[in-house]
Image (tube, rainbow, N blue to C red):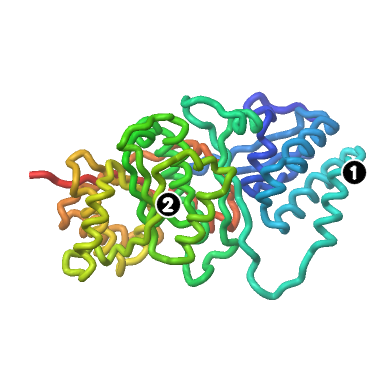
Amino acid sequence: MPEVSERVPKIKLGDFARCYGSHLVPKFNSGDLSTEFNLGRNNNGTFQFANLEIGTLQETLIEEVLLSPQFNRYPPPTSFQRTFWKAIITWVESADEEVRHEIYDRYIELLQNRSVTSGPPSPAYITHFYSLPAFGTSSAEAATGGFSSITLLESQTTIESGTTGLRTWRASYVLGDWILANADMVASARVLELGSGTGFLGILTGQLQTAAQTSTSAQKLWLTDIHSTVIDRCKHNIALETNHLQKHQGVVVHTLDWADCIATSPEFTQVSKFMEIVRPDIVLGADLVYDDSIIPALVAAISLALRYSERSMAFIASSIRRPSTFITFKKEAELANLIVTNLPLHVRSAFLLADDDHSRGEGVNTVVLLRITRRHA
């Protein structure tokens, strides 16, 4: 079997689960089984599994993936499952080894259950594993080599029910890296998220707050969005048992229309009362700057959220699809007496990100991370 470079990470407990959960399909690389994933800022990583004997590799796959209660209860798309197991079978057979019957039976089952539909694919689960900061390790983490996980029911299309909010986009992972790097700050804060979508950042924040085991009155979490279908999906994902937020007593999902945060809005008084209750220390938001038409309302929402404490800060990650829109946002923020500061991105992401249609080709270099504060007299 070919020698594995010392620069290639050795396979360890949980690596197969991480790849499978993140919809990463093993590929062939000079005869070795590998899987490539994006580590941020154009750094592509590769897990090479050639350092395992094929028998051990199959045993690990069966234990971590095939028999996993997590993946049996919250499975990835069946189309991905077929591609994943086909790649494994092809590699094992190319090495003149016998495929374990458990793996082969699963693949045959997936082929037999192939349905022919003309409509869009159904929503499916994706599970992201990450290393929890030093708050402690639960039994669930120990089962996957010390990783915590976030499981989401997501759309498999760009737009579903008239919204793009039913899947997680690249900017959310960038902001997720910031949250992990500042876990102590987030874990003890009152946090408001704008445009929560499927709940990825909210679940991550809630898990950190729960793991920190701080019971201060400040530890609260409000997740907001406007689309009713997105709100329902966010609630669904938060309630998933595997996300372990049952012990968090302060998670609130709330409908919020940024336009109501404009002072001339008939709903301004009501929204102001909501913000006064929230009084966030930290405001989070990913992929909020996407169209010129929503910028005045977005800036009004950020400004209102930061009004109640001089120490409040907003952290916004946004993909730059149209530079002119981003320039307009910064100008509007300045007019609202907000200070916008660019923050450095993490070189390597804590999350495995496939360079496929899940990210829609959004390389991390197209994402900016901003800190926003109010300008005080």
The total of numbered circles placed on residues is: 2
User: Residue 4: x percent and y percent?
Assistant: 72, 28
Which quarter of the figure is the C terminus placed in? top left
| Disc 1 crowd, CA 10 A, few/some/many (<14, 14-19, 20+) | few
Residue 323 seen in render: yes
Mark 1 = which residue?
Answer: 101
Q: What residue type is labelled 1?
A: His
- The residue sitting at 48% across, 56% down in the picture is 234
**Is 21 located above or below residue 360 in the figure?**
above
Q: Which amino acid does label 2 sit on?
A: Thr
* 242 with respect to 98 (left or right): left
Of helix, strand and loop, which one carries label 1? helix
Foreground tag (1 vs 2): 1
Q: Residue 126 carries which label?
A: none
- In the image, residue 125 sits, relative to residue 292, either above or below, namely above
- Vertical position of residue 21 compared to residue 79: above or below: above
Q: Name the residue under label 2.
A: 366
In-front residue for pair 129/43? 129
Residue drawn at (76%, 71%) of the image: 116
Q: Is mark 2 on a helix, strand or loop?
A: helix
Residue 94: x and y, percent?
87, 42
Is the Cβ of the residue at disc 1 closer than 8 Å to that at disc 2? no
Gap between marks 1 and 2 measured at Cα: 45 Å
List x then y, in percent, for residue 253.
41, 54
